[in-house]
């Protein structure tokens, strides 16, 4: 390990696992309340805080959706190829899509179909591509590019444009990646807040202070929901519960909030009951991939000089 002080390696890997597990538990928790309104959630659950499955997809407890599955497509492609290869990620998306998954967002569906027809690795610009389907799968990108925000920005946009080609989606992907990375690296809360505020300064659609609007699939609404919950809470569980009880696109807001909060607070902060609700094979794979991706990153493998 040439790039990073090995005394910090355990903590880095711990928080990297927190980020990737955060995607899965946030997805599984939020899928139950997806497309519900806060009043409906209160009437049915009081406060929704357990991974019980169900929801409009009628999932089994601990079953995840496209948020986790597409994230794993990226992680597996990087791990299998030993580096960043966009065509390998596209092929993983296509293979996953061909398996008739339980849920696929409309923009992701269109983008993957275009890839299957044309083999192009960038979908054409589209004013309707400002959804959250690219931002939801940023955790493995953030892990693999840890230590280089420039590399993060490049890879974030490349993977996004396989399915989404819109400036707001691009900017959201980069910002989510930066928050995850800063969390993993132990940045103070102010460092994460700065990344969110920089996004809002560049694109006022993302202004989030006091946000109490809907948690829709529009990427700005998604991130305003996530940032509002993350920066108004002090722990993983509180952040996730607040996020998914907003309803609407709750599997995706839960997945993104889980990635950021998991990076910030670490794997041990994720409630054990939520981790154990995930299938054992999924738990093992997430743990292995998180460690592998972060150890492949520029943080541990800086470019040779001289």
Image (tube, rainbow, N blue to C red):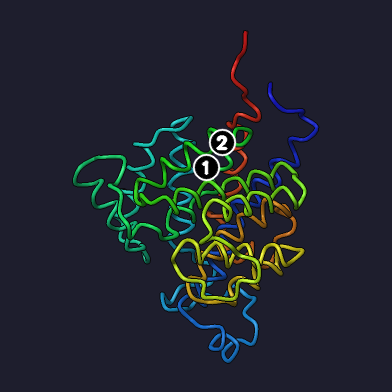
Query: Any mark on residue 145, and which?
Result: 2
- Identify the image quadrant of the N terminus: top right
How far apart in space, not on screen, are marks 1 and 2 (Cα)? 6 Å
In the rendered image, residue 145, in percent from the top left (x then y), is placed at 56, 36
- Identify the image quadrant of the C terminus: top right
Residue lying furthest right in this view?
Answer: 7
Disc 2, SS: loop
Crowding at mark 1 (Cα within 10 Å: few <14, some 14-19, many 20+): many
Q: Look at the picture and state if 199 lies above or below 212.
A: above
Crowding at mark 2 (Cα within 10 Å: few <14, some 14-19, many 20+): many
Residue at the image point whose x is 60% and y is 66% from the top: 277
Query: Any mark on residue 236, and which?
Result: none
Front-most of residues 87 and 130: 130
Whether residue 125 is visible here, answered yes or no, is yes
Residue lying furthest bottom in this view?
Answer: 43
Q: Look at the picture and state if 90 lies above or below 230.
A: above
Whether residue 271 is visible here, answered yes or no, is no
Residue at the image point whose x is 69% and y is 21% from the top: 2
In the rendered image, residue 242, in percent from the top left (x then y), is placed at 65, 73
In the rendered image, residue 290, in percent from the top left (x then y), is placed at 59, 44
Q: Look at the picture and state if 159 lies above or below 129.
A: above
- Residue 12 appears left or right of 149: right
Q: Which residue was labeled with disc 1?
A: 141
Residue at the image point whose x is 69% and y is 41% from the top: 13
Say whether marks 1 and 2 touch (CB < 8 Å): yes
């Amino acid at each position: 390990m040439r790039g990073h002080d090995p005394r910090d390696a355990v903590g880095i890997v711990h928080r990297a696992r927190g980020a990737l597990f955060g995607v899965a538990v946030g997805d599984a928790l939020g899928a139950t309340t997806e497309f519900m309104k806060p009043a409906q959630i209160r009437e049915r659950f009081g406060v929704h805080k357990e991974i019980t499955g169900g929801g409009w997809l009628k999932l089994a407890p601990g079953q995840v959706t496209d948020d986790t599955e597409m994230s794993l497509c990226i992680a597996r492609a990087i791990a299998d190829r030993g580096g960043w290869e966009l065509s390998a990620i596209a092929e993983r998306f296509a293979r996953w899509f061909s398996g008739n998954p339980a849920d696929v967002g409309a923009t992701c569906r269109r983008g993957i179909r275009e890839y299957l027809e044309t083999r192009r690795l960038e979908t054409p610009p589209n004013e309707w591509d400002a959804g959250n389907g690219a931002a939801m799968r940023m955790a493995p990108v953030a892990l693999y590019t840890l230590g280089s925000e420039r590399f993060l920005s490049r890879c974030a946009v490349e993977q996004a444009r396989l399915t989404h080609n819109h400036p707001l989606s691009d900017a959201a992907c980069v910002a989510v990646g930066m928050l995850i990375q800063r969390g993993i690296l132990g940045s103070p809360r102010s460092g994460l807040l700065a990344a969110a505020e920089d996004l809002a300064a560049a694109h006022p659609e993302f202004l989030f202070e006091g946000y109490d609007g809907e948690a829709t699939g529009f990427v700005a609404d998604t991130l305003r929901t996530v940032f509002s919950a993350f920066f108004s809470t002090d722990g993983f569980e509180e952040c996730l519960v607040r996020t998914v009880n907003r309803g609407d696109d709750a599997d995706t807001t839960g997945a993104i909030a889980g990635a950021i909060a998991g990076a910030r607070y670490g794997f041990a902060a994720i409630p054990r009951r939520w981790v154990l609700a995930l299938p054992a094979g999924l738990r093992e794979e997430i743990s292995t991939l998180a460690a592998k991706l972060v150890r492949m990153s520029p943080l541990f493998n800086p470019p040779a000089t001289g």
